[in-house]
Image (spheres, rainbow, N blue to C red):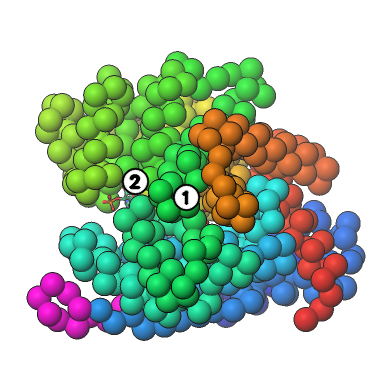
C-alpha cells in the first residue's frame, strides 16, 4: 500500500465515526496528491504525509457569559492551529450551533493549502464556537465575544496566529473580539483581520471573498473563450460571501436568479439586482432578517426549507454558473446531476467544501469547469494577508490598490493550480492542481525546517 493510502486509512479508522467532515477533507486532498508521492521521495523520508494530517495544536476552552435575563450560559470554544510551516496560523472563526471539533479540523486542514495557494506566507488554522449569534442582542454578543477572547488572547498574535471571520462572525463580532484582544493584551496589532477600516482594517476585505470568487470564475471561463457576462447565475446563501458574489456578478453583467438562507430559497428570474439587491443586502447584513421578506416584498417564488440545489433539481431550472456560498456539503450527487443535465457550464465554490465527493465526481465526469473552494474562495484570506501586511507597516492602502492585488492573486492561484495539474498528469483538473500546488509549498517548507 502507498504511504498516502495508509494515512487515509488510518485517519478514516480513527475519526470516521466522530469527525466525518475532517475525514472527507483529508481523503479528498490526499487522494488527489497521489501523483506527488513517487516524484518526491524527500517528502516520504521526512514523514510529511503522517505529519500533515495532525494539527500542531488543538485548543479547547469553556466560554461562560451572562444573557440579558441574567442566566449564566456556557459554550465551547475551539482554535485548531493546524500547520505553521509557511507562516503564522491564519484562518477564520465560525460561530454556529453546529460547530464541533471535526468541523473546525476540516476547515483548518483546508486552510493550510488554500493559504499556501495565495502565495502569501500564512499557515493554516481555524476556530470557533457552538454559540449562535442569531437571536442574541448586541450586548449578549459582546459579552460572549469578550469571554471567548479572555481565553483566546493568550494563543494569538500578529506573528503567531491571526483569526478572522467565517459563518456567524462578521463586522460586529470582529469588533468586539478585537476590542477584547486589545484590552487584554494592551496592544494594537494586526492579530485579527476583517477589522473595520477605522481601527486598522483593510479596505475591500468585506468584499474580498465574493469578488475573488467572481474573478476566479471569469479566469476559468476566459480560458474556454467564455465570460461571466450575460450568464444566468445561482448563488446559495445570503451572507458575506454570497452578497458580494452577487454584487460582482451583477457588475460583470450576469443575472443572479437564486439566493437563500438557512430557512429557504428565493427565485427571482428577473435578477437580484439594483434596488432589489440593495434591499437584500440591508435585510441580511444590517437587519439580520429572513430572505423570505424579499420574496414577499418583490412577489417572487419562495421555497421554504429548500436549498437552491433542491429547487433547481425539483423545478428543472437551468443556470449557467453555480456559486455555492452557504456551507459544507450543500450539493449532493443528485443536485450535481440536475445542474449538469440542465446545462451548467461552471461550478465555483464560495463556501468551504460545499460539494460532496459524489457531486464532485459528477462535475468531473461531465467535464464542466470546476473551481474548488480552496482556489475559488481564497480571495478572502488573501486580503486578510494584505491586511496583515498593512498592519505590519502601520499604513492603509486604497481600495484600488487592494482590488488590484486581489485580482492578481486570483489569477496567480488559477495559474498555479493549472500548471500543477499539467505537471502532475491531470491537465485541466483544477481540484488536483490546487491540492498539489498548495501541498508542494507546505511540504517543501516542512522538509526545509527539519523534523520536530
Ligand atoms: P455568513 O454567516 O455571513 O453567511 C452564511 C450564509 O449561509 C447565510 O445566508 C446562512 O443562512 C447560510 N447558511 C449557513 N449555514 C447554513 C446551513 N447549514 N444550511 C443552509 N444555509 C446555511 O458566512 P460567510 O458568508 O462568511 O460564509 C459562507 C461560506 O463561505 C462558509 O462555508 C465559509 O466557511 C466560507 N468562506 C467564508 C469566507 C469569509 O471571508 N467570510 C472566506 C472563504 C470561505 P442564515 O442567514 O439563515 O444563517
Ligand atoms: O475560509 C476562509 O478562508 C475564511 N473564512 C477567511 C479566513 C481569513 O483568515 O480571512
Please give the name of the residue rendered at 17% of the width and 74% of the height, measured from the top-left corner.
67
Say which quadrant the N terminus sits in.
bottom right
Q: Earlier along the polypeptide chain: callout 1 or callout 2?
A: 1
Badge 1 crowding class, 10 Å Cα cut-off, few under 14, some 14 to 19, many 20 or more, is many
* Picture mark count: 2
Q: In the image, which is nearer the foreground, mark 1 or mark 2?
A: 1
Q: Percent position (x, y) of residue 441?
A: 76, 56
Q: Which residue is mark 1?
A: 201
Q: Percent position (x, y) of residue 369?
A: 59, 33
Q: Which residues are magenta?
A: 66-75
Residue 414 lies in the magenta-colored region:
no
Q: Which mark is residue 239?
A: 2
Q: Is residue 351 left or right of residue 435?
A: left
Q: Secondary structure at mark 1?
A: loop
Q: Secondary structure at mark 2?
A: loop
Say which quadrant the C terminus sits in.
bottom right
Q: Is residue 449 left or right of residue 80?
A: right
C-alpha gap between disc 1 and disc 2: 19 Å
Asked where in the image residue 132 lies, by quadrant, the reply is bottom left
**Residue 8 visible in rendering:** no
Amino acid at each position: 500500500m502507498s504511504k498516502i493510502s495508509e494515512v487515509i486509512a488510518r485517519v478514516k479508522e480513527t475519526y470516521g465515526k466522530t469527525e466525518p467532515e475532517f475525514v472527507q477533507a483529508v481523503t479528498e486532498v490526499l487522494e488527489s496528491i497521489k501523483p506527488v508521492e513517487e516524484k518526491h521521495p524527500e517528502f516520504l523520508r521526512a514523514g510529511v504525509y503522517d505529519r500533515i494530517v495532525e494539527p500542531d495544536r488543538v485548543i479547547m476552552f469553556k466560554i461562560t457569559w451572562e444573557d440579558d435575563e441574567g442566566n449564566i450560559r456556557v459554550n465551547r470554544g475551539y482554535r485548531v492551529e493546524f500547520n505553521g510551516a509557511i507562516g503564522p496560523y491564519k484562518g477564520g472563526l465560525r460561530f454556529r450551533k453546529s460547530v464541533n471539533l471535526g468541523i473546525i479540523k476540516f476547515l483548518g486542514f483546508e486552510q493550510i493549502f488554500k493559504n499556501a495557494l495565495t502565495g502569501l506566507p500564512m499557515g493554516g488554522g481555524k476556530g470557533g464556537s457552538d454559540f449562535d449569534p442569531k437571536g442574541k442582542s448586541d450586548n449578549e454578543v459582546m459579552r460572549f465575544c469578550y469571554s471567548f477572547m479572555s481565553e483566546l488572547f493568550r494563543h494569538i498574535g500578529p506573528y503567531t496566529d491571526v483569526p478572522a471571520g467565517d459563518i456567524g462572525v462578521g463586522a460586529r463580532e470582529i469588533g468586539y473580539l478585537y476590542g477584547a484582544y486589545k484590552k487584554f493584551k494592551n496592544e494594537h496589532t494586526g492579530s485579527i483581520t476583517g477589522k473595520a477600516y477605522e481601527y486598522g482594517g483593510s479596505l475591500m476585505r468585506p468584499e474580498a471573498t465574493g469578488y475573488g470568487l467572481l474573478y476566479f470564475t471569469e479566469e476559468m471561463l476566459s480560458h474556454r473563450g467564455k465570460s461571466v457576462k450575460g450568464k444566468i447565475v445561482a448563488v446559495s446563501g445570503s451572507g458575506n460571501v454570497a452578497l458580494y458574489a452577487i454584487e460582482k456578478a451583477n457588475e460583470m453583467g450576469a443575472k443572479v436568479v437564486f439566493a437563500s438562507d438557512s430557512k429557504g430559497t428565493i427565485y427571482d428570474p428577473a435578477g437580484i439586482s439594483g434596488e432589489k439587491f440593495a434591499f437584500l443586502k440591508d435585510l441580511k447584513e444590517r437587519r439580520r432578517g429572513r430572505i423570505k421578506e424579499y420574496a414577499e416584498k418583490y412577489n417572487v417564488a419562495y421555497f421554504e426549507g429548500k436549498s437552491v440545489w433542491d429547487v433547481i433539481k425539483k423545478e428543472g431550472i437551468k443556470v449557467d454558473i453555480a456559486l455555492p456560498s452557504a456551507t459544507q456539503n450543500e450539493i449532493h450527487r443528485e443536485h450535481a446531476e440536475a445542474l449538469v443535465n440542465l446545462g451548467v457550464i461552471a461550478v465555483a465554490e464560495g463556501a468551504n467544501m460545499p460539494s460532496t465527493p459524489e457531486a464532485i465526481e459528477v462535475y468531473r465526469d461531465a467535464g464542466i469547469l470546476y473551481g474548488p473552494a480552496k482556489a475559488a474562495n481564497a480571495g478572502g484570506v488573501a486580503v486578510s494577508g494584505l491586511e496583515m501586511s498593512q498592519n505590519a507597516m502601520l499604513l492603509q492602502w486604497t481600495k484600488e490598490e487592494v482590488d488590484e492585488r486581489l485580482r492578481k492573486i486570483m489569477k496567480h492561484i488559477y495559474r498555479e493550480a493549472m500548471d500543477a495539474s499539467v505537471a502532475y498528469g491531470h491537465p485541466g483538473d483544477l481540484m488536483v492542481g490546487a491540492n498539489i500546488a498548495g501541498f508542494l509549498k507546505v511540504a517543501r517548507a516542512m522538509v526545509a525546517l527539519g523534523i520536530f
